[in-house]
Every structure is written in C-alpha cells, then in structure tokens.
Amino acid sequence: MHLDIDQALDDLRHAFPGICVWHGEFSGSLWALLPDRLVEARTAAGLARQLHAALPRPGAQVIRRPLPPTRRPDGTWTTAKPTAAGSPHRRDLAGRCRHVVRWLLTSCSHLTPATSLS
C-alpha cells in the first residue's frame, strides 16, 4: 500500500509542481498546502479534482476587478490605487499562509520523539 501512496504522491507532485502534497499518516488522507488554505481528500483523484478547481489553469485569462472606491478625509470619494507593497488582500493572504505553515510546524512537532526510542 505504501508503494501506491508513494506513486500517487509522485503523480500529484508532477501534475502540480510547487504545491506541497503529502499523506497524513494518522488521518490516512492526502493533503495539499495551497497559498490560502489546506486541501484534504481521501483519494489521489479527489485531491487532484480539488486542486484543479482551486488553481488557475495555465494560460487562463485572469479577470481583474476594479479596486473599490475609497473615501477621502474631506468626505469625497476616489478610486483606490494599488500601492507598491501590494493590495491589502495580498498582504493578508501572506499572513494567513505564514500562520498555516507555523501551525503545521508547531502542531506536528509533538510527533517527533525528543529522545531515541531504541
């Protein structure tokens, strides 16, 4: 069974380069870490379907929505302009990604034995 899981993981990693994919030893599920969330599936086909739905397709046209208008201190409205640091959504997304990675690293640290088991 480990060979089947290893082969499925290799296939997923080849199909979705740059996406961290792994098998949860205790959950028995396959997992993928996307920039904005974790994705879980019981089968490799199920995970592949979810990843195809969540990720943009190569060559797909990205539709950019106009930025929402903002209000000036004097009460008049203007259209927001993107800053050099990026949009607030992107900064928030990066913070959430760091939070998810930190959570994964700290929650899994108890699985590693502190001393040798032999």
Image: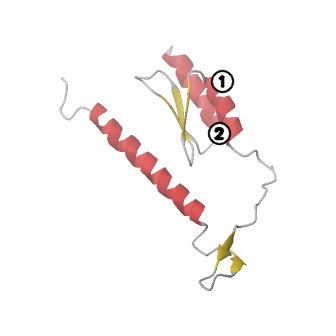
Q: Toward which corner of the image does residue 90 lie, by quadrant?
A: bottom right
Q: Secondary structure at mark 1?
A: helix
The percent coordinates of residue 65 (x first, y second) are: 76, 61
Q: Nearer the viewer, mark 2 or mark 1?
A: 1
Report the number of discs. Answer: 2
The percent coordinates of residue 107 (x first, y second) are: 34, 38
Q: Secondary structure at mark 2?
A: loop
| Nearer to the camera, 77 or 1 | 77
Q: Residues within 10 Å of mark 1 (few under 14, many from 20)?
A: few
The percent coordinates of residue 31 (x first, y second) are: 52, 32
Identify which amino acid the numbered label 2 is placed on: Phe
The percent coordinates of residue 78 (x first, y second) are: 71, 78
Q: Residue at x 60, y 69 (%)?
A: 86
Identify which amino acid the numbered label 1 is placed on: Ala
- Say which mark, if any, is on residue 96: none
Relative horizontal placement of residue 65, taking residue 112 as reference (left or right):
right
Q: Residues within 10 Å of mark 2 (few under 14, many from 20)?
A: some
Instruction: Check the picture and name the quadrant holding the C terminus.
Output: top left
Q: Toward which corner of the image does residue 89 lie, by quadrant?
A: bottom right
Residue beneath disc 2:
16
Q: CA distance from mark 2 to mark 1?
A: 13 Å
Q: Earlier in the sequence, mark 2 or mark 1?
A: 2
Relative horizontal placement of residue 118, taking residue 9 as reference (left or right):
left
- The image's colour scheme reads secondary structure
- Say which mark, if any, is on residue 45: 1
Q: Is residue 78 above or below residue 55?
A: below
Q: Are marks 2 and 1 in contact (CB under 8 Å)?
A: no
Residue placed furthest toward the bottom = 74
